[in-house]
Amino acid sequence: MNTSEILETLTQKGVKIWIENEKLNIRSPKGVLTPDIQAELTAHKLEILEFLRDTSQQEHATRNNIYSTSAIPLPQGLILQTIGRLIGGASEQLSLECQEPVIDPRLMAQRLSITFRPLPKKYKNVEIIKFRAKLEQKLQEYGVKVIPWQQATREFRYEINIPFTNIKKSIKTRVVKTGINAVIDVDRPASIRSLAETFAAEKLYQLYSHFILKGRKISVTRIGSLIGWAEDCAAKFIEDPTNTQVIVLSNIDKEFVSFQTPYQEKIKMGLNTLVRTFSEIVIGVSQSEFSILNMNLSDSVFSMDEFDKFVLKSLIPKVYVPILPLPLSKFKLGSYNPQSSIYAQKLVSLSTQLADTNLFPPGSKLSEVIKRQSHRDIVNVIVNGRTGVSYGFVAYAEPPQYIGAIEIPEHEWESLTAVNGFSSDEVRQNTIGRRYLKTKVGVEYKFKQIPDIWVCSARSGSNKTNLQLENDILRIGLTDRLLLDLPQGVDPKLADIKPSYDVYVMLAIALSTSLYAPNLITNGMPMIHFHGYPAVEWLQEQEYFMGVNNPSVPCGTYESGVFNFLSIYNLVNQYGTDINLACLIEPDHGTNIIAPDLEYLLSRLKTGCEQSAIELGGKHFYSLEKTK
């Protein structure tokens, strides 16, 4: 065998080989590296080192080529890397994905690897079979690497010890390798045998959890190994669930996508569908239309004529940037006194007055939605310890904080020094460390101080229409890093007080508004996000919307923050700075609405809801889309 064949064979057997400090490193499952294989590796060591070096260089060149457009200035004169680092509050410490957000779905597609799990024997759902074949073809046309199942998986053996017995069960299966971004499967009806096995596996897991784990957390992979032998879902085949999403094709749920179904009912239906199929995304298929569902609880429906657009603008972005919450480790923690913050108090007032709009349905406790303990434990790991989910956010941005001149002339800019991690053509700092941004406003360049941003935000999972001042409001900061001030007396180790999934969106809106539309935020700025849309007829003079044609990236991602940052700039560039209210549209997700005045925002929202011109779900999205 040649070098590439040797490495491919070993990779399929789960062997990992890499170069570190110019040395060959090998990690292998027990029993794979036989004496013959070890001898072959030794004999070809130099060739393997050279092959891995060349492969690494090629991947680096490909990555640079993919990201080459990020070095091209956008209309406001900034490159994507700069925007990403600004809203992330860090520079060279950021990972590659954070440093250089990708907002073009065609470029996202080039970085994706997807596999299709083989269909069950005697599978006869003709519509899903046709849809599946068409989907595979279209993904390949857009540049996604569609990896055959055998190449995307490797053989995996493990043993489970049945609690309180000497019985060991040996399991042999195939698992999807970590580098695969998604597995596409079909909904598989449960048989009587599979139901019985699942029941037995769950009871054994409960015993194991109670008597052996005793409250200790274990990895998702370990939980999967304990229950996977009884599962017939694609999730059991995932080597690393944090890197590989499961997409299930199913019959479309007409009740779920109906605009007549109350959104509160859709939350329960959607969560149960995701849990039942144990997937991150469910695509509902019928002869004439199809839908997409993920944790954003979108009820978007597409006609078959929109297939190409759906794959490029909806599915590919969701696979490229999965929904993941920001862990507390991303922030520098501090504390504050909510009683002394007028903006925390304003946020409480905003929340209580939003109750009549019905835009913020009560959240769902995971323990009530997810019945199986093993599934709850898996979700608990993935969502970073959150005990519930809620839909929408309420926040109040404080006025931006500056030290010194807010804007400086070009000759003064020229005297400033570079900032680590940023291009000196875009970001520089003065002698006291205040950073300035060179950005295009209209047809000329302005040199504006990058302010410190602070936003009072409801904690994740809280009741958005009945916030408690003492323990529901976090103060999130953006300087040269992310900051998080917790209410005094709250211990994050004991309380479920996690930041919202939408942190990047809040900070991006506040920062972009400070730079391009300061009149909106000079006296503080209320912000809301709900999982619906306003009708275009609801908008009055000096009220605008933007973003309806953006790719539908999920909440909680760098990319969602970048799109909202750009939407503010595009609004100002198109309509000027006299803005009374702005709607920032996130397709397949919802709407962010901001205004410079709390009472004005509340008045407009209540009027829209009373007139049914603002509703949860996707009913009004089409009026916005047609206008653009």
Image: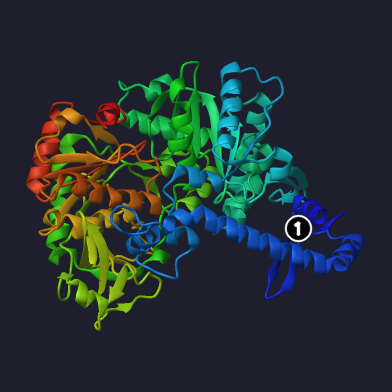
Q: Position of residue 394 (x, y in %)?
A: 23, 48
For residue 305, what is the image quadrant? top left
Q: Is residue 165 visible?
A: no
x, y percentage for residue 489? 27, 68
Residue under the image location 74 percent in, 40 percent down: 150
Q: Position of residue 106 (x, y in %)?
A: 49, 43
User: In front: 264, or 97?
Assistant: 97
Task: Classify 511 as above or below 526.
Answer: below
Q: How is the image coloured?
A: rainbow
**Amino acid type, label 1:** Val
Depicted 128 relative to depicted 72: above or below: above
254 in relation to 595, above or below = above
**Is 12 situated left or right of 95 in this image?**
right
Q: Is residue 146 in sight in this rendering?
A: yes
Residue named by callout 1: 15
Q: Quadrant of residue 151?
A: top right
- Closer to the camera in the image, 412 or 525: 412
> Which image quadrant is residue 412 in?
bottom left
If the image is split into quadrants, where does the N terminus sit? bottom right
Seen in the image, is 96 located left or right of residue 90?
A: right
| Residue furthest bottom in the image | 431
Position of residue 175 in the picture relative to residue 252 (left or right): right
Q: Work out which quarter of the rendered image holds the C terminus and state it.
A: top left
**Residue 16 screen position, x and y as percent:** 72, 60
Q: Nearer the viewer, residue 531 or 1?
A: 1
Q: Residue at x 40, y 49 (%)?
A: 387
